Image (cartoon, grey):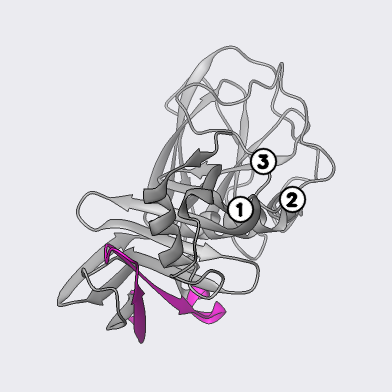
Amino acid sequence: MTRVFSAALAGVLTAGLAGAMSFGAAGPASAASERFARLGDWVVFAVFRDGEFRACRARLRSRTAGALIFSYNGRIWRVGVPGTGSRTKVAGDLFVDDFSQFADFAGSRDGKRAATRVDDAFIDEVRAGRVFGVRLGGRERRWSLNGSAAALSAAEDCVAQNGGPARRPKLKRFEMPNARTAAPEPRAEPPVMRNAARSGAGCPAPGAMPSPSSDVRRQVRFTNRADQAVNIYWLDSGGTPVEFAALMPGETTTLDSFSGHRWIARDFQGRCHGGVMTVDDGGNRFTIR
């Protein structure tokens, strides 16, 4: 991973870490970030200052709304959004679908970012929600929460490892680990992997359904028609679930795979929907119910 240093970055970092770091902290050139994982449109990265780990962030960019950032230091969650130009406190509203709450936002030094603290109950709304929004400075911004549950779990995973490397594949075209060469996941998995490996109703026993070796590239499409969110897992060469995507009800995703590889869709109660889905030489479109 590459650690990037810049004075501009430091100004942004202070906005999302109010309390953990004060806005007036000195030494902006000492701030740095490292990418931890990419999950669909979300990027999770670790924040360091003076060489010490401070927090992890899940970031979602939108061309129209700007960057949405959830920051977590192991104790406190904060939400960072585009600012109003003010460096002082600004009153606003946060909302997830039909749920909303008042919030006081603190502006960054340049006024380009604003951040506020939220509790665990609000984060649970974000995990299960479809749309996140903020009303601030007379403007309303909205972001799709597709993949938010996986991204926030990855941020918690990042904190548990003090910003260390993630054991997840990168979602690049035709770069999914090939079961012929990929080793099973290490036994000392981070928390998200341990949760994924638990076998619930309709799920295969751990290690029972490994993906076979294959060089035949295929694409696979998953559509969630269930009435709840699910995570999509690839079963690696050891049969260990590796998370690739999160789908809210009605959402669809297309992933790169190999012929013969196996996938499961698992909800947050640990139940698998549709059993084991195997990629073949056909259309490879799976509907999750």
- For this orientation, the residue located farthest to the top is 215
**Circle 3 is placed at which residue position?**
165
N-terminal label among 3 and 2: 3
- Residue 280 picture location, percent across and down: 54, 23
Question: Residue 50, labelled with which disc?
Answer: 1
Question: In the image, which is nearer the foreground, mark 3 or mark 2?
Answer: 3
Task: Residue at 49%, 21% (x, y): give it.
Answer: 174
Amino acid type shown at disc 1: Asp
Q: In this view, does 258 lie above or below 164?
A: above
Q: Tell me if 128 is positioned left or right of 113 in this view.
A: right
Q: In which quarter of the image is the N terminus?
A: top right
Amino acid type shown at disc 3: Pro
- Residue 106 highlighted magenta (yes or no): yes
Question: In the image, which is nearer the foreground, mark 1 or mark 3?
Answer: 1
Question: Residue 190, labelled with which disc?
Answer: 2
Task: Residue at 24%, 73% (x, y): give it.
Answer: 86
Q: What stretch is highlighted in magenta?
A: 96-124
Work out whether residue 251 or residue 161 is closer to the camera in this orientation and state it. Answer: 161
- Residue 208 picture location, percent across and down: 80, 37
Amino acid type shown at disc 2: Pro
Label 1, residues with CA under 10 Å away: few <14, some 14-19, many ≥20: few
Q: Distance between the residues labelled 1 and 3?
A: 19 Å
- For this orientation, the residue located farthest to the bottom is 102
